[in-house]
């Protein structure tokens, strides 16, 4: 609380004060967790996920990778990565996004879109809300593989980070 001199009130004292309550904003804290692209805890198959340039992972079919982040407090989990198409034939203009089904502790949290491009790495962010404190298994499963005589989509990603986001009231 703070005090403001208010001279419009008369009293036998020299000053009157009015109490004003100041609302504080919530405090948002972000902590990067010790998880990286190559630090998978499990893969759908060791032969279907390959290590690429720039410490990246890529796959040629609908496969998954798992990570085991530990949340020090309840909150949200931001997953950041960069993706590119690794197919030699390219992708059609209509194939704009890789579709990733994201699960936490065996429960699907939905399908998230990650930009797909051949010539440039594209950044993406996935936010999972309401995770409890403790260790979790996060699975990223690529679900929209596409291959034809003229096109070939192959999901490749790098620079994976997982960030714990907590909000506290002051």
Image (cartoon, rainbow, N blue to C red):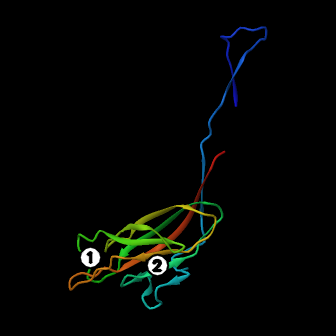
Element class at badge 1: loop
Which percent across, then down, holds residue 148?
23, 84
Which percent across, then down, holds residue 140?
46, 75
Q: Residue furthest bottom?
A: 47
Q: Residue furthest right?
A: 13
Quadrant of the rendered image containing residue 118: bottom left
Quadrant of the rendered image containing residue 131: bottom right
Total labels: the figure holds 2
Looking at the image, is mark 2 or mark 1 earlier in the sequence?
2
* Relative height, residue 169 to residue 151 (above, below): above
Q: Is residue 33 left or right of residue 47?
A: right
Q: Residues within 10 Å of mark 1 (few under 14, many from 20)?
A: many
Image quadrant where one finds the N terminus: top right
Task: Tell me whether the residue at label 2 lies in contact with that at label 1, contact meaning CB atoms closer than 8 angstroms.
Answer: no
Residue placed under numbered mark 1 in the picture: 91
Q: CA distance from mark 2 to mark 1?
A: 22 Å
Q: Residue furthest left?
A: 150
Which percent across, then down, holds residue 69?
59, 71
Instruction: Give the residue displayed 66% in from the left and 64% down from the top.
Output: 72
Instruction: Give the residue displayed 40% in from the left and 72% down from the top.
Output: 100
Image quadrant where one finds the C terminus: top right
Residue placed under numbered mark 2 in the picture: 54
Of labels 2 and 1, the one closer to you: 1
Q: Residues within 10 Å of mark 2 (few under 14, many from 20)?
A: few
Quadrant of the rendered image containing residue 124: bottom left
């Amino acid at each position: 609380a703070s005090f403001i001199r208010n001279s419009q009130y008369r009293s036998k004292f020299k000053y009157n004060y009015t109490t004003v309550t100041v609302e504080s904003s919530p405090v948002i804290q972000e902590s990067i967790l010790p998880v990286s692209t190559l630090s998978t805890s499990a893969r759908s198959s060791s032969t279907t996920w390959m290590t690429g340039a720039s410490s990246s992972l890529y796959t040629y079919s609908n496969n998954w990778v798992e990570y085991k982040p530990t949340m020090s407090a309840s909150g949200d989990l931001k997953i950041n990565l960069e993706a590119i198409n690794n197919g030699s034939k390219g992708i059609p203009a209509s194939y704009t996004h890789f579709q990733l089904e994201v699960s936490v502790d065996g429960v699907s949290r939905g399908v998230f879109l990650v930009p797909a491009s051949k010539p440039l790495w594209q950044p993406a962010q996935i936010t999972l809300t309401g995770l409890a404190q403790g260790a979790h298994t996060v699975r990223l499963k690529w679900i929209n593989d596409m291959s034809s005589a003229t096109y070939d989509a192959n999901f490749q990603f790098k620079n994976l980070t997982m960030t714990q986001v907590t909000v506290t009231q002051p």
